Image: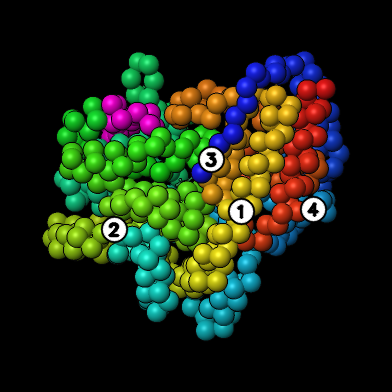
Amino acid sequence: MSSAQVAGPAEIDRARLAALIERERATYRHRHSKSRAAFEHGAAHLLGGVPMTWMRMWAGGFPLYLDRARGAELVDLDGNRFVDFCLGDTGAMAGHSPEPAVAAVTSRYAGEGGATTMLPIEDASWVAAELARRFGPTHWSFTLSATDANRWAIRLARQLTGRPKILVFSYCYHGSVDEAFIVAGPDGPRSREGNVGAPVDPRETTRVVEFNDLDALERELGAGDVAAVLMEPALTNIGIVLPDPGYLDAVRELTTGHGCLLINDETHTFSAGPGGCTRAWRLSPDLVTIGKSIGGGIPFGAYGLTAELAERILADEDADIVDTGGIGGTLAGNALSIAAARATLEQVLTEAAFDRMIGLGDRFTAGVGDVIQSRRLPWSITQLGARAEYRFCPQPPHTGGESAAAADSELDEYLHLYTANRGVLMTPFHNMALMSPATTAAHVDTHTEVFAAAADDLVG
Ligand SMILES: Cc1ncc(COP(=O)(O)O)c(C=O)c1O
């Protein structure tokens, strides 16, 4: 993990930026006319005109429509080719349609047959053993998404501790988990802006503190009602916020001391290495959750717990984890997802692949850092292994609140349009770039050149 920062920042000329955005919007409309037509005329019965409403998030007024994707590149409906650093916001961190996963899925679906049968397949044991080897917790169960892995891990934690609340960090994101839509503010905790139809006020279910604030964590855990702390070892969904030295060890000590469980959500922080931050930083959570990339693009998620917790939950006669107790889904643990996960973990997201991906993360961070420094831009870049993110503040943010305050929708739009118009795809939500096993040094250098050109246009 690393970050670079600048001294003596230059000012951003807002009038100039507004003119550049207009120019880039026009180019975007021109280059992507088929995507625009598909969005404007072909989607009358899709809520918001898109298959999932967050696909409206793309800058430019309409999303790019996918034609095809392989490895680290994709082609849109207009035939434009992109180097893809978005990688499905980590769902495609293994690269698009990696060959081993294609072969395993084809074999299971078209060969043996039986995508979803409610029967186990033997590969499940291999996947669980591999997750145990990589992340530590010894007993694993499967889901179709990281959201469900978190939801079910939270339920298990409540059952195991007999406590009602969980604790999360301000501006975290753990999927559409009701308990997590809460932020810390000067007047105390509040529901996160835009929280849709919340089942209850999240203050009833959740305590929230800023990341890297140990005093606040100790105070909140002191109430004695927290079943589990749900955390990413580094925040990745509000830019990247790295832990202070010693912070995660102190979190472990405090959670143990206050009798609550620690859940590491490694869905994004998996970028830190083959066993995520948990292994890279020698952490010892009680539960680990993960999703997105480990199915090679096929829906798959997992949660693992220690042997002691597994024994306790299996022995708990009040906990129906088999039928209608609130944990599980018909398609969870299905054969197709497991076949994809085995192939992805065994042959794609390997130790060697992570070495290469992290090397490319270093290259990306160095390239962007040089551009930021040489143009004296008041920005910073932060790296977490194979993932890097630039943020519009001169110092890398230290809390979720600080990082949220550095959001700049105009700069976001400008950079997203600028890169998309020149064949580079970044994550739409923020300025995250992810390396896959198929990403090359040439891909990274393409981004650096485009980013440098965008900076030059901006500073004139
Ligand atoms: C850390 C983290 N956990 C969980 C999720 C939820 O993943 P999914 O939407 O695939 O369920 C996300 C999604 O961005 C995430 O970033």
What type is the residue that disc 1 sits on?
Answer: Gly
Q: Are marks 2 and 3 in contact (CB under 8 Å)?
A: no
Q: CA distance from mark 4 to mark 3?
A: 31 Å
Between marks 4 and 3 in the image, the one whose residue lies nearer the viewer: 3
**Hey, which quadrant is residue 168 in on the image?**
top left
Q: Which residue is mark 4?
A: 81
What type is the residue that disc 2 sits on?
Answer: Leu
Q: Which residue is mark 3?
A: 2
Seen as rendered, the residue at the extreme bottom is 112
Between marks 4 and 1 in the image, the one whose residue lies nearer the viewer: 1
Residue 204 location (% of width, % of height): 27, 31
Q: Does residue 415 appear anywhere in the picture?
A: no
Give the label on residue 244, or none: none
Q: Please say if 453 is above or below 132.
A: above
Q: Are marks 2 and 1 in contact (CB under 8 Å)?
A: no
> Considering the numbered disc 1 on the image, is that residue within a helix, a strand or a loop?
helix
What type is the residue that disc 3 sits on?
Answer: Ser
Q: Residue at x 48, y 35 (%)?
A: 241
Q: Are marks 4 and 1 in contact (CB under 8 Å)?
A: no
Residue stretch in magenta: 202-217
Q: Nearer the viewer, residue 201 or 258?
A: 258
Residue 455 location (% of width, % of height): 76, 30
Q: Residue at x 39, y 20 (%)?
A: 185
